[in-house]
Structures are given as C-alpha cells and as structure tokens.
Image (cartoon, grey):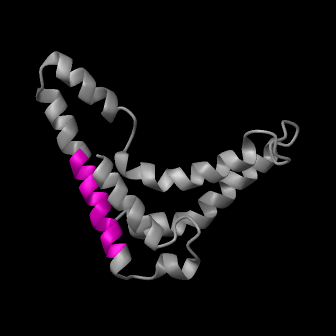
Amino acid sequence: RRAACARLSDTLGRIEWPAASQLTMSAQGPAHAELRQAMCEALLLQYVSEAAAARAPEAESQTLNSESKAGLWALEPFLEPVLKRFRFHFEGRRETNRRDKPEWMFSHVCNLLRMHAPMLVAQVQP
C-alpha cells in the first residue's frame, strides 16, 4: 500500500498537483499516463486486499478490513497536499480561521473544486 501511494505521490509531484495550471491539467503526456497507471495499481491493490480479507480467517480479516475501511487508497495522495493547505489556513490562530466568517472556508473549498474538477474528470475518472 505504501509503495503504491508513494509512486502515486511522486507522479502527482511531477505534474505539480495541486498547483497544476489549466494547461498542465489538460496536457497529455508521460506523467499523465504514469498517473493513470499508478492509480490503477493502487485501486487494484486495494481490491485484491479486500478480496483477500473476505476470504481470510476472522482475526486476520479484521486487521485487513480496518485498513480498507479508510477509503480509497488511491485518493490519499491527492488529498494530502490539499488538506495540508486547508489546515494551514483554517486551523490554529490564523486570521483566515474565524468562526464569524464560515463563508471563507466554504469559498475556499468551492474554489478548490472548481480549480481541480477538470483534471479529476479528464485524467482520473476515465
């Protein structure tokens, strides 16, 4: 799992995720092909792991199931830098972390979705 996620993180770093421009996001190149390959490997690994957990004895199955319930492994490398930036702005004593201005957080999330949706739809979803 760690190796598959590390490969995916490296590939995302090469395409400058999450700061990729619209031009970079729409470009087709070796990094995008490698991104798709790394995503497929992580998804396949999780699928095989969950299938093995379903066939494993009870004690071993509980360990494997606790890992797989965390969500899609392939999405973790996508979320790490986005969550890091979110936490920077909206946790702690930053001026952007104001309880009387929840619209700042909402606006930030909406902007992230708008900015990254084209790449996720074009490169990740297929």
Residue shown at 84%/40% (left/top)?
A: 98
Whether 4 is among the magenta residues is no
101, 42: nearer the viewer = 42
12, 125: nearer the viewer = 12
Answer left or right for 66 relative to 111.
left
Can you tell which quarter of the image residue 47 is in? Answer: top left
Q: Position of residue 43 (x, y in %)?
A: 28, 51
How many numbered markers are drawn?
0
Whether 38 is among the magenta residues is yes
Q: Position of residue 117 (x, y in %)?
A: 54, 63
Answer left or right for 44 relative to 55.
right
Quadrant where the C terminus lies?
bottom left
**SS assignment for the magenta stretch, majority:** helix
Residue shown at 74%/44% (left/top)?
A: 90
Can you tell which quarter of the image residue 32 is in? Answer: bottom left
Q: Position of residue 54 (x, y in %)?
A: 16, 28
Q: Position of residue 59 (x, y in %)?
A: 19, 17
* Identity of the residue furthest to the top in this view: 58
Q: Which residues are magenta?
A: 32-45
Residue shown at 35%/67% (left/top)?
A: 35
Answer left or right for 55 relative to 23.
left
Residue shown at 36%/32% (left/top)?
A: 69
59, 55: nearer the viewer = 59
**Relative to 111, does residue 72 appear above or below in the rendering?**
above
